[in-house]
Image (spheres, rainbow, N blue to C red):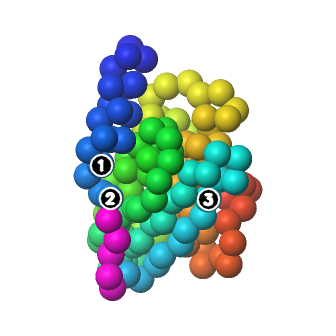
Amino acid sequence: MDDLYREVIIEHYKNPSYRGKLDPHDISFADNNPLCGDHIQIDLRVDDGKVSEARFDGHGCAISQASADLLVESVIGKSLEDVKKMNRQDILDLLGIELGPVRLKCALLSLKVLKAGVYGLGEASDALVE
């Protein structure tokens, strides 16, 4: 089963559906993982309290980029309140594989960026992904 999920991760890494930037956007936030150099920016358009469009941009390993693509896809249509409730398990469920501590940090970068943007924070914190 892990092989199937690994194929999904590679597909989202090589052919992301939601890569790009939104201009104009209502919410935009970017951050990086200083341990490995992964970088993610997420842009959202919001209508009536719900995410109507979302895109990510950045660079990094397959896990960070695939998780960003999967996460952005999953939030379209969600309310900002539902986005605020998302946690690390949501990312792990999207990826479908177990990750060690180093790869987990890569996978959670997009969630950290998304939530920092939605909360309107000046900087992202690991506490956002608990």
Residue 127 position, x and y percent, is 73, 56
Whether pointer 3 and pointer 1 mark residues with C-beta atoms closer than 8 Å, the reply is no
Whether pointer 1 and pointer 2 mark residues with C-beta atoms closer than 8 Å, the reply is yes
Q: Identify the residue at horizontal 55%, vertical 42% (top origin).
A: 107
Predominant SS along the magenta part: loop
Q: Nearer the viewer, residue 39 or 95?
A: 39
User: What's under tag 2, amino acid-wise?
Assistant: Arg
Task: Report crowding for label 1: few under 14, some 14 to 19, many 20 or more residues within 10 A (C-alpha).
Answer: some
Question: What mark, if any, has residue 19 been given in the picture?
Answer: 2
Q: Which residue is mark 1?
A: 16
Which of the two labelled residues, at mark 3 and mark 2, occupies the earlier sequence position? 2
| The quarter of the displayed image where residue 125 is located | bottom right
Q: Look at the picture and state if 101 lies above or below 46.
A: above
Q: Which residues are magenta?
A: 20-24
Q: Is residue 77 visible?
A: yes
Q: Which residue is mark 3?
A: 32
Element marked by disc 3: strand
Judged left or right of residue 101, residue 32 is: left
Q: Identify the residue at horizontal 32%, vertical 58% (top origin).
A: 19
Question: What mark, if any, has residue 108 been given in the picture?
Answer: none
Judged left or right of residue 7, residue 130 is: right
